[in-house]
Image: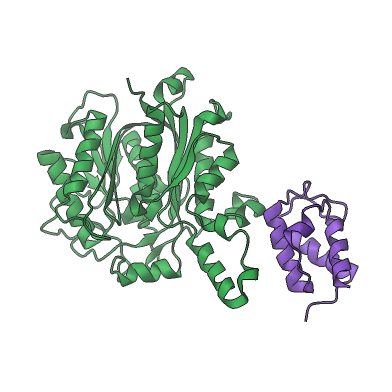
Chain colours: A green, B purple
Amino acid sequence: MTPGVVITGMGAVTPLGVGVDALFGRWSEGECSVEDGFARCSDFDATDHLSRKEARRTDRFTHFAMVAADEALSEAWPDGPPYEPERIGCVIGTGIGGLGSLERQQDVLRERGPKAVSPLAVPLLMGNAAAAAVAMRHELHGSSFGVMSACAAGAHAIGAALRMIEAGEADAVVAGGAESAIAGVAVAAFAAMGATSPTGISRPFDARRDGFVMGEGAGVLVLENAEKASARKAQPVGEILGYAASSDAHHLTAPEPSGRDAARAIELALADAEVKPGDIDYVNAHGTSTPLNDRSETEALKAALGEEAHRIPVSSTKSAIGHLLGAAGAVEAIATVEALRQRVAPPTVGWEERDPDLDLDYVPGEARPLDRANGNGRGSLVAISNSFGFGGHNAVLCLAG
Amino acid sequence: MPAQATTESVEQVIFDGLKELGAEGEVARSSTFEELDVDSLDLVELAQIIEDEFGVSLQGEDVKDLRTVGDVIDLVVARSQ
């Protein structure tokens, strides 16, 4: 029998502030953190949380991950880890890694030559840096690695962590995603491919949507074997009921228009969770605000959930914090768990004009209570969180809270 | 032109450099790198600062047996003569 996996701690650094409460509280109130076309963690100063030395030896994306992990771990294990360090893993996804550090060292190389390049350049920029730093900071000696699947990386990291616990390879895994890529090359390249919003507005599923808004931040969750968590009388904040991933194998950046493979990931995640579409109370959409994603994701939801798709509230965290790329899946999983715990579906902020082809309930205007209208027989509510990445990577989590 | 490497000037550059690198606690000639939590990556960065300032190139072989801040200062002053 596969062990269940519960969530015992969560932490987030987002453009809405440091902490899960800032993320969910402000989003629920309809706040949007986009300014001048970007959603930055403007109030975040690494040295408020880390020593000078820790801060200068890690990139900003790793700073976010370390601070989010501190919050998650202090919630899960205020008295320290309850398991052998060898039985605790660490998996942190990212879309790009330490791009700012790479660009700065590239400038040093060009202007001052190879002898001036910092010996820290590689450990700063490598995509696994956040996983390494979190594992070192908390002395986690289980399997530790980074995950790269563009904007699905945070969800894939949680999925990988889930499977590690189910397989008995770990008792607990610190899992999440982190990103800080609002830097020259990425900003220019996303604009060049027409992915980002020329108007600088994130309005998922709205008829006027014209691209995503780049954001930055991190989300980290502590996952534990449910039996072991129960044995130590932990109070889980949520549960991972299921997970599945698939690939469009269609195009470098564009989603497959019918959402066929995204729908299959949703169906497989529900099967993994032993949940039916009628049991689902909420959908946290990938909802990027690009014309293509929001259309194919709507198609995928309808294909996977059938008639139930029209009943279920669907909202996008990206309407409040922009697109956190490789951190998005983790931050949005956290937001989903909070929505279930607090029985609130936050709104798709800024949604006003219906696109005739997008006919689901995108929770316009204000947050809405999530009542247990359909009754799935559990004591908790159930949701799915979708993540899709450039390259056709689809990852779907089924969560309870 | 690299700066004149006197004991005082080398000491100043190295003390400032170590603080910039985030060395923990007070930096003195007698401080060991272990006490300051300075590792091999920090020493490479320190060597880059020293080369920029005094034109003295320190390789891995040169620094691997150094234990205290004073050891580095003496080596740089000796090399620059």
Q: Is residue A30 visible?
A: no
- Left or right of A63: which side holds A271? left
Residue A384 in which image quadrant: top left
Image quadrant holding the C terminus of chain A, namely top left
Residue A369 in which image quadrant: top left
For the point 41% across and 20% down, the residue is A227
For the point 42% across and 52% down, the residue is A94
Residue A46 in which image quadrant: bottom right
Q: Nearer the viewer, residue A235 or A365?
A: A235
User: With respect to residue A261, does A352 lie above or below?
Assistant: below
- Left or right of A70: which side holds A165? left
User: With respect to residue A307, does A95 lie above or below?
Assistant: below
Q: Residue furthest top?
A: A231
- Left or right of A146: which side holds A283? left
Rendering coords of residue A98 (x, y %): 50, 58
For the point 16% across and 56% down, the residue is A257
Q: Is residue A83 visible?
A: yes
Q: Nearer the viewer, residue B5 or A32?
A: B5
For the point 50% across and 55% down, the residue is A126
Q: Residue furthest front?
A: B61
Rendering coords of residue A267 (x, y %): 19, 38
Rendering coords of residue A380 (x, y %): 29, 28
Q: Nearer the viewer, residue A353 or A177?
A: A177
Q: How many marks?
A: 0
Image quadrant holding the N terminus of chain A, namely top left
Rendering coords of residue B46 (x, y %): 73, 62
- Left or right of A344: which side holds A148? right
User: With respect to residue A3, does A238 lie above or below?
Assistant: below
Q: Nearer the viewer, residue A368 or B24?
A: B24
